[in-house]
Image (cartoon, rainbow, N blue to C red):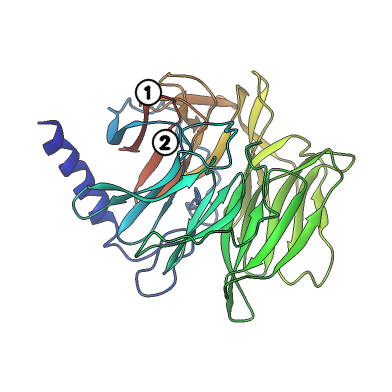
Amino acid sequence: MRLALLSVLLLGVACSSDKPPVQGEPDASGPVDSGSDAGTDAGPGEEDAGSCEPPPSVRESVLVPGLNNPRRLAVDATDIYISESHSLRPQADYGDGQVLRLSRADGTVSSLAKGFRSPDAIAVDARNIYVLDQGGLWRVDKATGERGTVPIEASLNGVITGGTDVRLGRLSGKDVLVVATGARRLVRVDTTGVSPSSLVLFEGTVDTQVRSARIDGTDVWFLVTGGTEPGLYRVPLDLDTPAQRVDASITTGTSLELTPTHFLITEGGGGTGRLLKLPRAGGEARVLADGLQGPLFPVELNGAVYFKDAVARSPAFLRRTRGCPPGTSDAVGPEGTGPGGLLVDGDTLLFTSQESGTGGAVGRVP
C-alpha cells in the first residue's frame, strides 16, 4: 500500500514537468538552469503576501523516507537530485555524504555519487550536477556519476557554515556558475574544460559571510552579513564594475529570492527572525512574518509566500505568510525538521526534512 501511494505521488510530480517552462523551472529542450532551491513569482503587480485566512492543513506526501541529513534539492525534466550529508561536521577527508537521484518516471531512488564530506548546495545543467562540499566544488556526470579525483574548484571549501548557493548563468555565450560560499567570498566559475577558471566577484573581511545568490540577466544579487558593511549587494557577472551595496538595512540576511518586482529576504533568528518583501524599484521593506527561529528559502507560489523555519520535528517548519494581520505566518502542515531545502517544482513545493539518523525525508506539498 505504501509503495502504491508513493508511486501515485511521484506520478503527480512527473506530470508537472509536462507543463510549459516557467521562471525557475527546467526546459527539457536545452540547458537546465536549476540551481539549488530556486523559486518562482506570482507575476508583476502581485502585492498580497497571502490570504487573510490561514492555509488548510495538508497531509505530508513523503517521496523519500529514511534519509540521514538530506539538505538541498535541484531538479531537471526527468529527475530530482538530493544532497545527503550524513554529518554536518565530518572530520575525515572522505565522508559518507552522497547525491541521490529520484526518478520522476517510476519513483526509484539511487545513489548517483558518493564520498562527499558534507554536500550542501547543488545545481544541475544538461550534463552535470554541481555539488558544493566541504572540500570544494565538484562536477558530477549525470549519466555515469563520475566526478573525478579532485574538485573543479578546491578553494571553495569550509562550506558547512550555511547560506551557500550554487547558481547557473550565462556570460558571453558560455555557461558559468556563481557560488555563494557562506564565508567571505562570492565566486564565478567557468564550467568548461577539465580545470575551469574562477573569478572572485566579491571578497569581504575575515568576519564577513556571503549568503545566498541569485542571477538576473548579467547581474548577481547576494547578501552580506558581518563585517562593517552588511547588506544587499549587486555585482555584474563580468565584474565590469565592483560589487555595490544596494540596501544597507539588511544587516543579518540569510537567504534571498527575486521576483520581477520584489526581493524576498529572510534575516535573523532565535525568535527574532523575519521575512521581508523589499521593492526592487526602491522603498521600505514590508515585514511578511516575524518572531521566527531561523527563516530560510522564501519562494512565491500561486500568489502566496512560503518559507522554511529552523525548528525540529514540528509541523511549523514549513510556513506560509498571511496578508493580515501584518507579520503573520501559519504552519502549512507537513511535519519535519529545518532548515534543509525548499524548491518550487511546477505547482508544488519540494522540501527536505533535515533530520539525522533515519528520520530525514524528502516530500512535497500538496
Query: In the image, residue 224 lies at what x, y percent?
Result: 76, 44
Taking the view exactly as shown, the residue that stands out farthest to the bottom is: 173
Q: Quadrant of residue 351?
A: top left
What residue sits 51% from the left and 26% below the top?
Answer: 329
Crowd class of label 1 (few under 14; some 14 to 19; many from 20; radius 10 Å): some
Q: Can residue 34 be seen here?
A: yes
Q: Can residue 303 be seen here?
A: no
Name the mark nearer the viewer: 1 or 2: 2
Report whether 322 appears left or right of 9.
Answer: right
> Do callouts 1 and 2 mark residues in contact (Cβ within 8 Å)?
no
Image: 210 above or below 125: above
Q: Quadrant of residue 214?
A: bottom right
Report whether 171 appears left or right of 63.
Answer: right
Circle 1 sits in a helix, a strand or a loop, which is it? loop
Give the amino acid at mark 2.
Answer: Thr
> Of marks 1 and 2, which one's residue comes earlier in the chain?
1
What residue sits 60% from the left and 50% below the top?
Answer: 165
Closest to the observer, 238 or 278: 238
Closest to the observer, 51 or 155: 155
Circle 2 sits in a helix, a strand or a loop, which is it? strand
What residue sits 54% from the left and 47% below the top?
Answer: 121
Q: CA distance from mark 1 to mark 2?
A: 11 Å
Q: Which residue is mark 1?
A: 335
Q: Which residue is mark 2?
A: 352
Crowd class of label 2 (few under 14; some 14 to 19; many from 20; radius 10 Å): many
Image: 186 above or below 354: below
Query: In the image, residue 247 lies at what x, y percent?
Result: 79, 47
Query: In the image, residue 115 lies at what x, y percent?
Result: 47, 46
